[in-house]
Image (cartoon, rainbow, N blue to C red):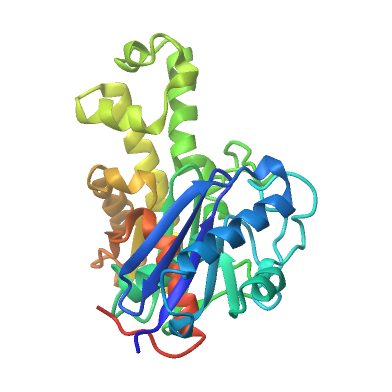
Amino acid sequence: MTLLALVADMGGTNTRVALVDETGSILHRRSERTRADAGRDAVMKRLAEALEEVASTAEASSIAGVGLSVASPVDPATGEMYNPPNLHGEGWHLFSPKSYLQDRLGFPVSLANDATLGAMGEHAFGAGRGSDNMIYMTVSTGIGGGVIVDGRLYTGHKGFAGEIGHITIDRNGPTCNCGNVGCLEVMASGTAVARMAHERLSAGEASSLLETAEGNTSAVDARMVADAAKAGDSLAQSLMHEVATNLGVGIVSLMHVFDPELIVIGGGMSQNLDMLLPDIDREIQRHAMAHLRDRRPVVKSELGDDVSLLGAAALVFSDRGPVEQK
């Protein structure tokens, strides 16, 4: 009998639910608004109902368990979430969905941070297949990630490992949302691209971005900047160069600490990885230790938007035995 994982990726805006088999194929899925402003109990009730609906499309005996991806730091032992930034309202801090979902659904439940599960997804089913040591980076609104060491997810003491967006690359840099200064996230994320574009346009620099944004510099986002850079806009190209260089600085630090076979880049900014790679490679050549400079470990995610869903499936299967890889 083919085992299936019943999985969900619960974000602040949307919640996606799916059935995934041991090869990483998604057999059935649904998506709905999270509606976090309705409160914890209402959100959990809708999540359970969505999981029940998707579970009803398969034999209950084939479901190995439930995997849940959440946009929050998670204690791997208890499943408790720590101040999830996109789930507003009371009751979320130190709340664990495990017991609620187990009681409601009758299946064992595992959960972890979404970016952390991205590492598991790519390792089991994506660009990291066959590697023993790899890092997954999601570069989007923010920067997060997960680390695979000797074929296993590294979670750290309390599940907080993998916060690679908050390594400091400039001690005199801008303040990050985490409270630190000069974090990789505040220097190289999609949000950083938009901020830097706004600052330079407001200072009077010329760019086609002004026309695209109809004169509203605050409306410029990372996608607009990337598109303008591809079209030859000099300011946009300068911004992409700066962000890629900052990413390269962070990646060199990760290479020195973890010595990974691969660093898999996902998230919205990965769509422009071909534009970013020359500057990332340049930073590796400039600043990596000599015995690492002949490597080019950076590759693009193969799983795209499904990376956390498939990571949740890998988490379920890893709790029950080896995952059959494609």
Q: Position of residue 153 (x, y in %)?
A: 49, 77
**Left or right placement of residue 322 versus residue 154 in this view:** left
Question: Hey, which residue is sitting farthest left in the picture?
Answer: 231
Depth check, front residue: 304 or 246: 304
Depth check, front residue: 143 or 46: 46
**Quarter of the image where one finds residue 49:** bottom right
**Quarter of the image where one finds residue 231:** top left
In the picture shown, does residue 77 fall above or below 115?
A: below
**Left or right placement of residue 70 versus residue 22 in this view:** right
Q: Is residue 43 visible?
A: yes
Q: Position of residue 6 (x, y in %)?
A: 48, 71
Q: Is residue 261 visible?
A: no
Which quarter of the image is occupied by the N terminus? bottom left
At a point 44% along the width and 38% down the height, the residue shown is 190
Picture mark count: 0
Q: Position of residue 257 (x, y in %)?
A: 48, 70
At a point 57% along the width and 38% down the height, the residue shown is 173
**Quarter of the image where one finds residue 210:** top left
At a point 58% along the width and 47% down the height, the residue shown is 34
Q: Position of residue 137 (x, y in %)?
A: 42, 58
**Left or right placement of residue 302 versus residue 305 in this view:** left
Question: Hey, which residue is sitting farthest right in the picture?
Answer: 90
Which quarter of the image is occupied by the C terminus? bottom left
Depth check, front residue: 276 or 267: 267
In the picture shown, does residue 89 fall above or below 238?
A: below
In the picture shown, does residue 90 fall above or below 315?
A: above
At a point 41% along the width and 83% down the height, the residue shown is 151
